[in-house]
Amino acid sequence: MKALTWQGKRDVRVEEVPDPRIEAPTDAIVKITSTAICGSDLHLYEVLGPYLKPGDVLGHEPMGIVEEVGSEVTGLKPGDRVVVPFNIACGRCWMCERQLYAQCETTQVTSEGKGAALFGYTSLYGSVPGGQAEYLRVPQAQFGPIKVPETGADERYLYLSDILPTAWQAVKYADTPPGGTLAVFGLGPVGQFCARIGRHLGAGRVIGLDLVPERLELARRHGIEVLDVRELSDVAGALIDLVDGRGPDAVIDAVGMEAHGSPVGKLAHAAVGLLPDKVARTMTDRAGMDRLSVLHAAVKGVRRGGTVSVSGVYGGEADPMPLMEMFDRGVQLRMGQCHVRRWTDEILPLLARDDDPLGVEDLRTHRVPLSRAPQAYEMFQKKEDGCIKVVLEP
């Protein structure tokens, strides 16, 4: 089959790789009909290369049609249309019983000290072949795949794989009081959904912050108040002034480790990228440094006693945080990998509605064949051609 493979920094290629097969009785094989490029895939394109090897198949936002199931998979049959969550969970261990599916003890990558295995996401998370391919082997298929209606565009349901439940969890963690104010840093795909979900779940005012004109305009189209951070010298101060002189009730950081405006973190990323993989892995694990401008602005801009919810991916272990200010202001901080299946039953009925309340069919800007995935990665990373969300068609 054809699949998108990692070959080096900013070097991904579509190659012929072996077809997946059933390896365990809880496996399924899914023929992919749509698969998306995620913002966190760009971390593999740039920062997390030391944890990849040439030929690794990328991608963790897939959906398709079940082709084959293992003997212990009773809830699926060939022909079912499914979305595949990006994290792999068994549904029955101690963590899964508590709906902490991103920490599944059956698939935890204990050798790396990490949580549940992920599709297409480095040796840190199990080196499981990803879904930017024609076919995908799905472990723990007795629990993971989400059956969706046979009709309707793929993009009505595709985002259940990651970004839609990730945004839903971020908003739930933010815990904005009814009628309160929510600010969302970063209006990429997750941030767009955070802003829309915030309004849907009862925030009286939602403010989105970004520096990309197309992202600002898309949010504005969905009734979100926007701030162009290029026009602000003090982002946190502007938020405080804008919301009653005290700041929003909750702030979501939907940006993560590669935030603009963090020159020291950017230099650290570049320096580590020049090291041999073994040394780079050690440096990233022990002394990794993120670009923290957004997280610091979120912490400083939320009101006293407010909540900062982090959905953007961070990877550093040596990140300085303003703990005295956080303590003094009583800031609550919630974060973590999304527990996808915890939220999908709440979201799925909204996707079946004709009025599309979350605007899932107004996010994708580019749909291209899998063969053009390398060009799509470059376009997405450089934010060219108004690119906000790319869907690949195998």
Image (cartoon, rainbow, N blue to C red):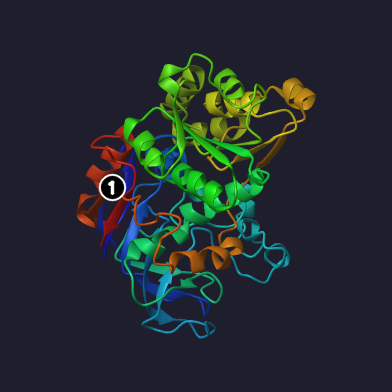
Q: In the displayed orientation, state which residue is furthest to the top.
A: 233
Closest to the observer: 80 or 237? 237
Quadrant assignment, res 388: top left
Quadrant that contains the N terminus: bottom left
Closest to the observer: 344 or 125? 344
* Local SS, label 1: loop
Q: Residues within 10 Å of mark 1 (few under 14, many from 20)?
A: few
Q: Residue at x 42, y 72 (%)?
A: 82
Q: Residue at x 67, y 59 (%)?
A: 100
Quadrant assignment, res 151: bottom left
Tag 1: residue type? Thr
Give coordinates of residue 348: x percent, y percent: 50, 67
In the image, is residue 228 above or below residue 313?
A: above
Q: How many numbered discs, if any?
A: 1
Quadrant that contains the C terminus: bottom left
**In the rendered image, is residue 125 in sight?**
no
- Residue position marked by numbered label 1 in the rendering: 365
Give coordinates of residue 35: x percent, y percent: 34, 59
Q: Residue at x 50, y 18 (%)?
A: 264
In the image, is residue 302 above or below residue 174?
A: above
Q: Residue at x 53, y 63 (%)?
A: 347
In the image, is residue 77 above or below residue 313?
A: below
Q: Is residue 13 left or right of residue 202?
A: left
Q: Is residue 168 left or right of residue 276?
A: right
**In the rendered image, is residue 310 in sight?**
yes
Give coordinates of residue 111: x percent, y percent: 62, 51
